[in-house]
């Protein structure tokens, strides 16, 4: 009996040892698997960064292409000479920004024109028009999803919600400004309050431009080999659009893999915790990169791939609208002398216009829903027949403003 008990204990110890060995092997396998998974996850994130950079370069290439074909800031300045009244100021601001593909360039030109003697009353509609024209970049990015009906519907709605918000902002505030001048008065008072004796220029602080400029210059160098600037500009535009499509498709696939777990929770916390959180996130991110087109364009593929809804992105877009005003403020810091006050005033007009638009339109529920409903209806129409997307893009940003300019000329 005793011998059997000893044998039982001996066998039990062997089994326990075997179990411990299995546990050790399992633990080692788990650690090895975790290491492989982490390494694989890191590689995916690296590819995300590479394609994000490609998208930023693509947007900059399109912008430079439009600028080269149209004549750059000089073309915008010439176009503004047609602005004989506030409505024409609005239209030329929209058309100039769509042509140059950069509201930063156009608002900086406007600040310079005001410093050179352009009346602030005439510059205000131009600033509002620049707000509308800059959203063309989002629409171009959304076309990267055109091969998938549902993705395109979400992406196109995400890109055009910005458009409809800006339309409503102009409809409300341009007439109020024309008849009361309350935005310019508020901006003038603020400029007088903050204006000091010294001027510190921050006009060259642009992170995105610094990062993308080397790649853009290489592409521009090849484009300049063509017979004239117009052909070179068109070549850059087409190259940039192709790169946008490629980047959006690749980013969409990669973001579905990485936007899980902690990464998704962090994004949800920043964007989906509430309207104020979304607005703050959009504003901070845009201030950092000094381009609302960049920040909102990065969000469009995420909405297209179903990671966020248009409603969740909406406050982020409004924050980007506020954050983009930093460019005009920085341009104003480069102006010295007697013109500095006027330059700062028009830059502050841009800021107050966007802040007040967010407060009024997003603050009033019946106005808040209009951009969401309108963009949803347009996206539904465009998803059924893609030609409507191209018609909207051409008509809203080029044909209608162009007709108005020609008629006035």
Image: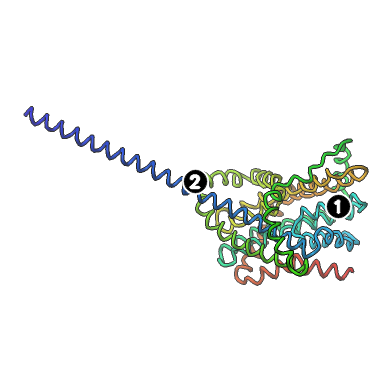
The image position of residue 278, as x and y in percent, is: 64, 46
The image position of residue 185, as x and y in percent, is: 88, 45
**Numbered mark located on residue 177 in the image:** 1
* Residue 381 drawn above or below residue 348: below
Residue 168 in view, yes or no: no
Q: Nearer the viewer, residue 236 or 133?
A: 236
Q: Nearer the viewer, residue 354 or 346?
A: 346
Q: Residue furthest top?
A: 2
Q: Between marks 1 and 2, how big is the CA–CA gap?
A: 48 Å
Left or right: 106, with 180 as reference point: left
Label 2 Cα neighbours within 10 Å, binned few <14 / some 14-19 / many ≥20? few
Under circle 1, the secondary element is: helix
Q: Nearer the viewer, residue 59 or 296?
A: 59
Q: Residue furthest left?
A: 1
Q: Could you say which quadrant of the image residue 122 lies in? A: bottom right
**Numbered mark located on residue 380 in the image:** none
Contact between marks 1 and 2 (CB within 8 A): the answer is: no
**Mark 1 or 2, which is nearer the eye?**
2
Count of residue discs: 2
Residue drawn at (89%, 39%), measured in percent from left and top?
192
The image position of residue 379, as x and y in percent, is: 63, 64
Q: Which of marks 2 and 1 precedes in the sequence? A: 1
Badge 2 is on which residue? 261
Residue drawn at (88%, 53%), measured in percent from left and top?
113
Left or right: 192, with 247 as reference point: right
Under circle 2, the secondary element is: helix
């Amino acid at each position: 009996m005793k011998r059997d008990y000893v044998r039982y204990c001996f066998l039990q110890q062997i089994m326990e040892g075997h179990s411990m060995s299995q546990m050790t092997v399992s633990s080692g396998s788990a650690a090895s698997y975790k290491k492989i998974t982490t390494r694989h996850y890191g590689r995916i994130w690296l590819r995300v960064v590479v394609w994000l950079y490609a998208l930023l370069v693509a947007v900059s290439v399109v912008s430079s292409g439009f600028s080269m074909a149209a004549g750059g800031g000089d073309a915008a300045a010439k176009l503004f000479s047609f602005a004989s009244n506030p409505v024409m100021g609005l239209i030329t601001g929209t058309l100039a920004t769509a042509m140059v593909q950069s509201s930063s360039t156009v608002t900086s030109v406007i600040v310079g024109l005001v410093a050179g003697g352009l009346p602030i009353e005439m510059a205000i509609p131009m600033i509002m028009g620049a707000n509308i024209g800059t959203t063309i970049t989002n629409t171009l990015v959304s076309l990267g999803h055109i091969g998938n009906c549902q993705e395109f519907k979400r992406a196109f709605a995400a890109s055009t919600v910005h458009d409809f918000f800006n339309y409503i902002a102009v409809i409300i505030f341009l007439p109020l400004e024309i008849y009361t001048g309350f935005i310019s008065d508020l901006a003038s008072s603020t400029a007088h309050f903050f204006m000091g004796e010294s001027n510190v220029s921050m006009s060259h602080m642009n992170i995105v431009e610094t990062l993308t400029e080397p790649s853009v210059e290489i592409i521009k160098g090849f484009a300049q080999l063509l017979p004239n600037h117009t052909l070179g500009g068109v070549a850059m535009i087409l190259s940039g659009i192709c790169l946008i499509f490629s980047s959006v498709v690749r980013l969409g696939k990669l973001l579905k893999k990485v936007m899980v777990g902690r990464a998704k929770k962090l994004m949800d916390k920043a964007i989906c915790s509430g309207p104020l959180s979304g607005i703050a996130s959009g504003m901070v991110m845009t201030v950092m990169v000094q381009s609302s087109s960049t920040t909102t364009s990065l969000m469009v593929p995420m909405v297209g791939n179903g990671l966020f809804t248009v409603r969740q992105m909406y406050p982020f877009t409004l924050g980007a609208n506020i954050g983009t005003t930093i460019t005009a403020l920085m341009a104003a810091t480069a102006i010295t002398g007697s013109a500095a006050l006027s330059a700062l005033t028009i830059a502050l007009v841009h800021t107050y216009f966007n802040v007040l638009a967010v407060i009024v339109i997003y603050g009033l529920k019946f106005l808040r829903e209009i951009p969401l409903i309108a963009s949803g209806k347009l996206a539904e129409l465009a998803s059924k027949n893609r030609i409507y997307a191209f018609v909207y893009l051409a008509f809203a940003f080029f044909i209608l403003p162009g007709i108005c300019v020609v008629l006035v000329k």
